[in-house]
Amino acid sequence: MKNEKINVYGMSCEHCVKTVAKSILALKGVISAEVSLKDKNATVVYDENLVNLSDIKKAVKESGYDID
């Protein structure tokens, strides 16, 4: 298992947080996703045999938010 922190930009409310979390959790292999509006990031635990960091970042971007 791998644990990564991703900076997420463009979130302004709890609905944004839920949208980002939902997009990450929809990926096969993601075990957990904690999204922080205050810290503007997502901490993701995932099985690197099933999903990779670029897939996770792509899901966040496709849900309408920016990452670095």
Image: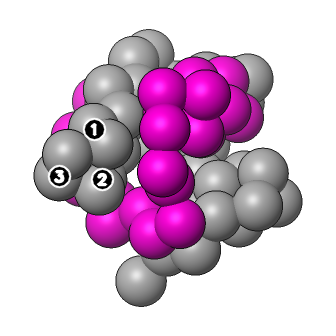
Residue 57 falls in image quadrant: bottom right
Could you tell me if the residues under marks 2 and 3 are in contact, i.e. CB atoms within 8 Å? yes
Crowding around mark 2 (Cα neighbors within 10 Å: few <14, some 14 to 19, many 20+) is some
Relative horizontal placement of residue 68, taking residue 58 as reference (left or right): left
The figure's colour scheme reads: one colour
The span from disc 1 to disc 2 (Cα, nearest Å) is 5 Å
Whether residue 60 is visible: yes
**Residue segment shown in magenta:** 1-24
Q: Which residue is mark 2?
A: 41
Asked whether the viewer can see residue 21, the reply is no
In percent of width and height, residue 34 lies at 32, 26
First-in-chain label (1 vs 2)? 1
Residue at which label 1 appears = 36
* 25 in magenta: no
Left or right of 20: which side holds 32?
A: left
> Residue drawn 33% across and 66% down?
7
Please say if the residues under marks 1 and 2 sit with CB atoms less than 8 Å apart.
yes
Does residue 29 lie above or below 36 as drawn?
above
Looking at the image, which residue sits at the far top?
31
Mark 1, secondary structure of its residue: strand
Q: Amino acid at mark 3?
A: Asp
x, y percent for residue 32: 39, 18
- Disc 3 to disc 1: CB gap under 8 Å: yes
